[in-house]
Amino acid sequence: MSLWKIAWRSMQQRALASWLTGLSMALGVALVVSVLVIHSVVDDTFRRTAQGYDLIVGAKGGGLQLVLNTVFHLSRPINNIPYSYYKEFTEDDHHRGKYARFIKLAIPYCLGDSYEGYRVVGTTPRMFDEFEYARDRKYEFAEGRNFKHENFFEGVIGSLVARQTGLKVGDEFNPTHGVTDDKVGHKHDAFTVVGILAPTGTPNDRALFVNMEGFYLLEKHAKDPPAKGSGHSHDDHAHDEHEHEHDHDGSAHGEHGGDSHDDHKHAHGHGHAHGPRKPLPENQREVTAILLRTRLLDDPVAAMGLPNAINDEPLVQAVTPAREILTLFDSIVGNLRLLLLVLAVLVVVVAGIGVMVSIYNSMNDRRRDIAIMRSLGARRSTVMVVILLESILLSVGGGVAGVVVGHATMGLISPWIVSQTGVAIGIFQFHWMELALVPSLVALATVVGFLPATTAYSTDVAKALSLAP
Amino acid sequence: MLRLNDVKKSFTEPDGTRLPVLDIPSFQVAAAEQMVLVGRSGCGKTTLLHVIAGISRADSGVVEVNGCDLAKLPEAGRDRFRADNIGYVFQTFNLLAGFSALENVLLGMSFARGKASVERAAALLQRVGLSHRLTHKPAMLSVGEQQRVAVARALANRPKLLLADEPTANVDSRNQQQIIDLVRETCVEEQVALVLVTHTAEVAEQFDRVERLDEFNQAVASV
């Protein structure tokens, strides 16, 4: 009969105490597993998502806030920047922005509205036609299609938004001014859902994207026009013409010819007449951020100097999302995780002490059993090993159960986490540090089993055999 | 088979004085011999069995079992020797409660050099009339059955010497004779020498050789 079996039988003999001790170990390990997996998935999701963008340009201020606000739909929106900055990153037949040669793709982002607590983003169809998320993945539609530039009041919604709000293709929704969760804010004109994005595992699953042209026409979304005769205004206006020649198809063109302050007023005066409305003049437009994919490979030296050049501008800053997230995780989230991990490990250590107390308390009752084994020829070291094996069985058995419980819990609460954060945690999502759990638990069990094992080692056989059974 | 020469053993009292328990000038048991040790309570019978089994170490003298002087062996060596060469039947059976009858016999084999054999354990239990009780835990066995399991366990490693410390003290008279018969028969079959301690005259008178420990143990005789 192996020593393992002898240890197992001893555990069975004290079934209730063994179960309770193993359970406390399982809960401690489940906590460790949860901390490891949740942090790992969140970390991975944030970093992967941040990698989808080379640079983000926005108003000067906190770089991290710009990234959180733009990429992760978190935090308060920052200030807007003039539309003319966006033009500096684009080019067409008639216009070439001063940074355009470094840019592969520039996507404007207009923020500030929400729908049932989910952020509404005004942007262009290129966001889903040309942009990639997590570096190399194209957006796909689970249902419907992308919105069209010429249809101002069309939009597409993220998979989570569709699931949570019940919006379907063909439904209309009215964005609310502001990004708070309350639903009593001012309601804007309705947009029609023309597509539902396939799940991306990114925060964009919990956002709604509408045609920027329609977004601009919503109440309070146009800034006051500059005073007449302003040279800058004239430039903006000229850019506007070129932009629309580039972007619009024929039908949009016709509507677009008479950009003016009067046109803008007209648009506001007929908030519900979507079709015939004209685009907002460029000199009244603002964007919250510009997402950039650079030509880093074509001209690495120049592209790497791009952020510095942008940061020299008076109103805007350029941030690298991956770097901001790295800083966030290394400086704050990483420490938080370390703290949680230390607490979870402490719970495991306390459970380990529970194993020690449980076995140690049983030693008095087992002194006679140990003496019997010794009388049958078991050496001191053998009975010591039996006690250590019992400690290991309780700790590792509880630990393995804890891994199962931890992952099962992740699987059970995964839908809730997805609904709250958009981060999907699978039941089989493992962290490499889990591999270290078993050897760590064996080491812990050996340490906590040492005291009762020493008691077994020092049992006086002759005296213990004289004890009444 | 068993030879004791000038064996002395004493215990330390709480006040620090030494209390002599064993002082045996000479004692021998031949191979496969069966004998009985009798004596009044406190004359050192159990202590003598512990010294012979190597559970306790003699303060001085020779304790030779099957040609090996246990007094010269370290504790681990005595443990190993005991596992391989000496069987022990206790008055209170001393079966482990969490183990089945078969596992209790297998446990007796686990600490010896040879590999634990389920076939051998099952055969021994069959020999003591418990083939239908292999998986029963001690609590599910009668007192007589428990002692029979203890006999099977003591013989599991084919020992050269079987020490039985009042094996019938806790069983009724019907079971008493069955146990004695079983122990004696199996010792003959396995060619094992038997040293049996008893208080019971009916048991003692069945043996050809009966020794009174309080007569040849000078630590007690001199008191």
Image: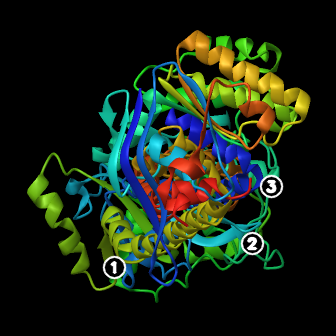
In the depicted view, which residue is nearer to us: A320 or B5?
B5
Q: Which residue is mark 3?
A: A165
Question: Label 3: how many residues lie within 10 Å, few (<14), some (14-19) or many (20+)?
Answer: few
Place residue A21 in its image quadrant. bottom right
Which residue is pictured at 54% across the width and 58% down the height?
A: B221
Which numbered tag is attached to residue A176? 2
Three-letter code for the amino acid on which mark 3 is drawn: Thr
Q: Is residue A85 visible?
A: yes
Which numbered tag is attached to residue A173? none
Q: Which residue is mark 1?
A: A316
Chain identifier of the residue bearing label 1 in the image: A
**x and y percent of residue A245 in the render?**
43, 50
Mark before the other along the chain sequence, 3 or 1: 3
Q: Residue furthest bottom?
A: A227
Q: Residue furthest left?
A: A301
Mark before the other along the chain sequence, 2 or 3: 3
In the depicted view, which residue is nearer to us: A335 or B212?
B212
Place residue A251 in its image quadrant. top right
Mark before the other along the chain sequence, 2 or 1: 2
Q: Is residue A392 visible?
A: no
Place residue A117 in its image quadrant. bottom right
Badge 1 marks a residue whose secondary structure is strand
